[in-house]
Each structure stands twice: as C-alpha cells, then as structure tokens.
Image: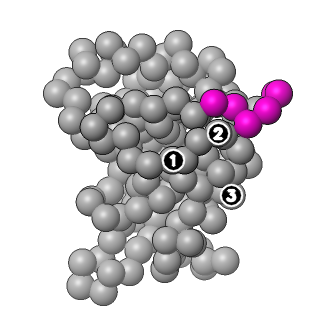
Amino acid sequence: MSSELRPQGDLPHRRQLPTVDDTEAFGRELAAELAAGDLVILDGPLGAGKTAMARGIGAGLGVQGRITSPTFIIAREHRSGGPGRPAMIHVDAYRLGDLGELDALDLDTDLTDSVVVVEWGEGVAERLAGRHLLIRLIRDLDTDERSVDYGWLPR
C-alpha cells in the first residue's frame, strides 16, 4: 500500500494516500484495530478525504447503510453488521456552534457500544473519551497529493 513517511507535528505516523481508494483502504485497515468505545477524530480541509476515511472505517467495521457526509443532519448512526461487532456513529462537527451543542448529541453514551467517528472534530470532541485516534488529513493544493498524520492521543 502506501509508504510510511516522517510525521509532522504531534502525531507519530504519516502515510501517503494518493487516491480516494487508498484513503478508504486505510480506513478499513484502521477499523481492524477499533472497538466499541473508541473515538476517532478526523480533521483536515474541505476535500481532504474525511468522508472517504469514514467510509473505509465503516466498511472495515462492517456496519450497515451507505456512509455519506452527515453535514446537514449532524450525526448518523450506522447499525452493527452482526453480533459482537460495534455500530458506528458518524458525526460532522463543522456546524456545531459550541461544546454545548456537542453535549446535546449525547455521544458519550453511544461510546459504550459504538465507534464514534467525528469529522471536523479536532479541538471539539476530544473530551468525549479518555483517548482518541486523531487522523489529520492533508491535501496539497498545488499538487492535489494527499497524506495523513495519525496516532492515539490522550485527552
């Protein structure tokens, strides 16, 4: 798949993701390491691949339903694909005005039996869990090359 590169900033890993298919495949790969109770925060500019990453995570978890951006409904639940498999709650935090609106979604209760994936969540959703997987998607506007920095961080 993609080659590992030196990460930037506070995240320990970097990977090149040349295509949308690569982004989705990486999401499926990450899903193999996720379990109910895990929080995944996706961050990056418009068009960087946040929803593609969420699609890959959902496919890897085997959840039900088509995964699309929850921009206008804020949060969408994707039911478990079978016994012993977690559901996925897919959230778009872009339109949330403040932490009170995030609290109103009551996501911390969903963490017990679901993987919660929050687009645009950096700086907003970290307090939902004691640790989270931060996936920072990067898109070079000049070349359209994409990469991702990622790693588990404490609250």
Residue type, numbered disc 1: Ile
Q: Circles 2 and 3: CB distance less than 8 Å?
A: no
Q: Which residue is the site of mark 1?
A: 67
Ranked by sequence position, the earlier of labels 3 and 1 is 3
Residue 102 is left or right of residue 98, and the answer is right
Looking at the rendered structure, which numbered label has been put on residue 82? none
Is 5 displayed left or right of 126 in the figure? right
In x, y percent, where is residue 72? 27, 37
Query: What residue is shown with label 3?
Result: 29
Mark 3 surroundings: few (<14), some (14-19) or many (≥20) residues within 10 A? some
Q: Residue at x 69, y 31 (%)?
A: 80
Looking at the rendered image, the quarter that the N terminus falls into is: bottom right
Label the magenta part by its dominant secondary structure: loop
**Over which residues does the magenta segment extend?**
79-84
Looking at the picture, does residue 22 appear above or below residue 94? Answer: below
Magenta stretch encompasses residue 15: no
Q: Is residue 82 magenta?
A: yes
Q: Amino acid at mark 3?
A: Glu
State the residue position of label 2: 64
Q: Amino acid at mark 2?
A: Gln
* Alpha carbon separation for disc pair 1 and 2: 9 Å
Compared across the picture, whether 82 is left or right of 62 comes to right
- Kindly tell me whether residue 30 is visible in this rendering: no
Badge 3 vs badge 1, beta-carbon distance below 8 Å: no
Whichever of labels 2 and 3 marks the residue nearer the N terminus, that label is: 3
| Label 1: element kind | loop
Q: In whole angstroms, how far apart are the C-alphas of marks 2 and 3?
A: 18 Å
**Image quadrant where residue 144 sits:** bottom left
Q: Is residue 70 visible?
A: yes
Residue 89, horizontal then vertical, whole percent: 51, 31
